[in-house]
Image (cartoon, helix red, strand yellow):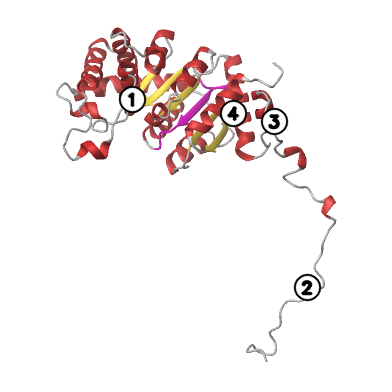
Amino acid sequence: MSIYEDQLRPLDLRAVKTYPLASRPSKVSLNDFAGPVSEDSSLKDFLASLPKILAAQSLREIAARMRRARELQKPIIWGIGGHVVKTGLAPLIVDLLRRGFVTAIAANGSVLVHDAEIAMVGSTSEDVDATLGEGVFGGADETGKLLNRAAQEGAKEGIGLGEATGRALLALNPKHAEYSLLCAAYRARIPFTAHVTIGGDIGHFHPQADGAALGATTHTDFRLLAELVRRMDGGGVYLNIGSAVTLPEVFLKAVTLVRNLGNQLTDITTANFDFIQSYRPLTNVVRRPTANGAGQGYSITGHHELTIPLLAAELVCDRSGK
C-alpha cells in the first residue's frame, strides 16, 4: 500500500500529445556527419570530412572571416601567449604571415622570452621545479640582457617594446631566426606589440631591468594595438590564443578606448583558442566586444598544437572556390 494520501496519484500520461518524428525540425542531419578518410586522402579531403557541427564548423567560419578580412585589407591580429611558442607553432604563424593571414601580433611578456631563446639557441622552457629551489630559475644571462636593453633603447627612441625587441634580436643575427615570430614580424614590418606585467617575466629581476623603460615601451604598444583595433571596423579579426588574463584585459581596454574616442567598431570577428575556456577570454574577447550586433565571437576548445594547425590548414586549403 502507498504511503501517500489517497488523493495523490501519479500523473496520467494518456492525453500526452505527440507528433511524427519526420515532421520535426532538427539541429543535426546526415548532411552534417563526418566522413571517413582513406590512406590516399588529401588534406582537402580530410578537412572536408570533418563534421559540419560545433567546433569544426566554427573553425571553417573563422577561416572564412579571416579570408574576408584579407580581401578587405582589414587587420588580422593574433594575440598570443607564450604557450603558443612553447608548443612549436611559430613556423605555422610565420607561414600564415607571409600569406597575409597575420597582419599584426600582440604578445604577452612570456612570448618575448621564449621566442628570443628559440631564435638564439634553438630551445626554451626551463624546468622550473628543478631550478626554483636554488633560486636560479629565469637567470639566463643572454635573455635578460637582450630584453632589457631593447626596452631601454626603445624608450629612448619612443618606439614600442615589441618592435625594439625584434630589432635587437635580429641585430644579433641569431642562428634560428627563421623560427622566430619577432624576427619574422620585424623583417616584414608587421606590427608586433608586447604587453608586459612588470614582475611577471624573468627579465624583470635581472640587473639591467628598468621599470620606467618597460612601462614606457609597453604603453606605446598598447596605444599601437588600440590603433590596430580601430582599423578592425568593417571586417577585422582578433584571435586570442593562449592568454587567459593579460591580453583579454588589454584587448578590452583597447576596444573601449577606440569607442571612447568616437570611433565605430562593428562587423568584427573575435575568437578564443584554448584548452580551457576561462572567464576573461570568453567575456572580454568573445562576448563583450561583439555584443549588440557589433560582430561575431567564437570559442574553440582544445590544445593549441591541434587546433592551430587545423586553422592553418583550413586557411591554406581554401575550399571556397576562390
Task: Looking at the image, tell me whether mark 1 or mark 3 is earlier in sequence order.
Answer: 3
Which amino acid, mark 2? Answer: Leu
C-alpha distance separating marks 3 and 2: 50 Å
Q: Residue at x 51, y 38 (%)?
A: 302
What mark, if any, has residue 13 been given in the picture? 2
How far is disc 1 from disc 3 in space, using C-alphas? 38 Å
Residue with the mark numbered 3? 38
- The mark nearer the N terminus, 1 or 2, is 2
Q: Quadrant of residue 251?
A: top left
Q: Return the x and y of residue 155 as percentages of the image width and height.
A: 24, 15
* Residue nearest the viewer, comparing 85 with 28: 85
CA gap between label 1 and label 2 equals: 65 Å
Please give left or right for residue 53 compared with residue 251 in the image. right
On the image, the x and y values in percent for residue 234 come to 57, 21
Q: Earlier in the sequence, mark 3 or mark 4?
A: 3
On the rendered structure, is 51 left or right of 263? right
* Residue at which label 4 appears: 62
Front residue (pair 305, 25): 305
Q: Which residues are magenta?
A: 232-244
Q: Label 1 belongs to which residue?
A: 114
**Which quadrant is home to the N terminus?**
bottom right
> Amino acid under label 4?
Ile
Is 159 situated above or below 212?
above
Quadrant occupied by the C terminus: top right
Residue 243 visible in this rendered orientation of the protein: yes
Q: Amino acid at mark 1?
A: His
14 shown above or below 221: below
Q: Nearer the viewer, mark 1 or mark 3?
A: 3
